[in-house]
Amino acid sequence: MDDVILEAQHLKKVFISGKKSMTAVDDVSFELRQGECLGIVGESGSGKSTIVKMITHLQSITEGNVILKGKDITNVKGKELREVYKDIQMVFQMPMESFDPRRTLGDGIGESLRNMGLSRKETRERVEKLLERCGLDKEYADRYPHQVSGGQCQRAAIARALAVEPSVLICDEATSALDVTVQKQILKLLMELKQKENFSFLLICHDLALVQAFCDRVLVLYHGETVESGTPDEIINHPKMDYTKKLIDSVL
Ligand SMILES: Nc1ncnc2c1ncn2[C@@H]1O[C@H](COP(=O)(O)OP(=O)(O)O)[C@@H](O)[C@H]1O
Ligand SMILES: [Mg+2]
């Protein structure tokens, strides 16, 4: 279909250490369409982050392909990979660790803009706008990561991800490390951004309840394999697998 932005085709990841090999992701396929939010849920260790890392080239792909806007990006490198990062951006679980502690948040958020050739002044203006879009006062541009809370840092991480105006935003357990009230605020922000902006979301999380509120479709992952997929309503109200029922029971 022509409105498919990102496609994972039969992704497989085998980790080898010494004589042992371990299949972390086994034949996972999905399509993410324009403006859609796709959730990937599964217990810890089920292979969620490995899928994200393969899509974003943080880890090699054992088998399978990744297609972005109709182009096979499985083996891109260098300049072509940098182009991919203009389309796919990520927000991770530990916001503090994703910023350089010696540089201000504003520097971190503006880095990609500077690399694209924007002047210092233009970059600053864009950074301030991005911060405000993410619910932070513009003076946060001058703060260092250790001078803000976890939730504020995650807002800055979202601002940084949005700086390049990506087509796809991947959030890998982006709220898991935050306390419950802050978690809700960040989700509210993501929800607002989803409504306002034109990007597609891949929302990785172990909490099915959260996915219910947020996603158009869900994949359930178990030991690296897709065991169910459907709308949140189908998954939660008519789960086919005992595993999914357990996932529901553990969070609802
Ligand atoms: N770099 C690695 N080397 C070896 N095994 C790994 C590596 N990264 C992840 N794994 C293993 O792959 C499996 C899936 O991990 P991961 O994708 O992080 O799961 P999740 O994000 O769902 O918690 C786990 O068993 C994990 O121990
Ligand atoms: Mg993970």
Image: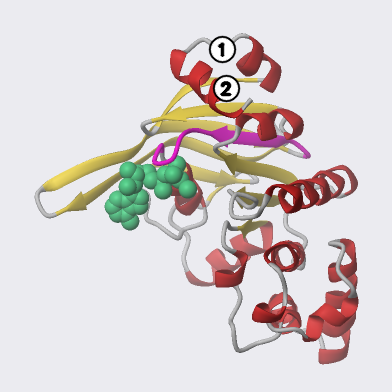
Question: Which quadrant does the N terminus fall into?
Answer: top right
User: Closest to the observer: 41 or 117?
Assistant: 41
Q: Position of residue 75 (x, y in %)?
A: 43, 56
Given residues 29 and 72, the one toward you in this image is: 29
- Mark nearest the camera among 2 and 1 is 2
User: Along the horizontal axis of the image, is 25 left or right of 36?
Assistant: left
**Residue hosting label 1:** 239
At horizontal 65% and vertical 87% (from top left) the residue drawn is 103
Secondary element at image label 1: loop
Place residue 84 in its image quadrant: bottom right
> Looking at this view, is 143 or 87 the one in front?
143
Q: CA distance from mark 2 to mark 1?
A: 9 Å
**Which quadrant, please, contains the C terminus?**
top right
Q: Amino acid at mark 1?
A: Pro
Depicted 208 relative to depicted 108: above or below: above
Q: Reply yes or no: does residue 139 show up in magenta.
A: no
Sequence-earlier tag: 2 or 1: 1
Label 2: element kind: helix
| Coordinates of residue 44 in the picture (x, y in percent) | 43, 40
Q: Is residue 13 left or right of residue 243?
A: left
The answer to which quarter of the image holds residue 6 is top right
Cβ atoms under marks 2 and 1 closer than 8 Å = yes
The type of residue carrying mark 2 is Ile
For the record, the magenta segment spans: 35-46
| Residue located beneath label 2 in the image | 248
Q: Quadrant of residue 95?
A: bottom right
Is residue 42 magenta-colored?
yes
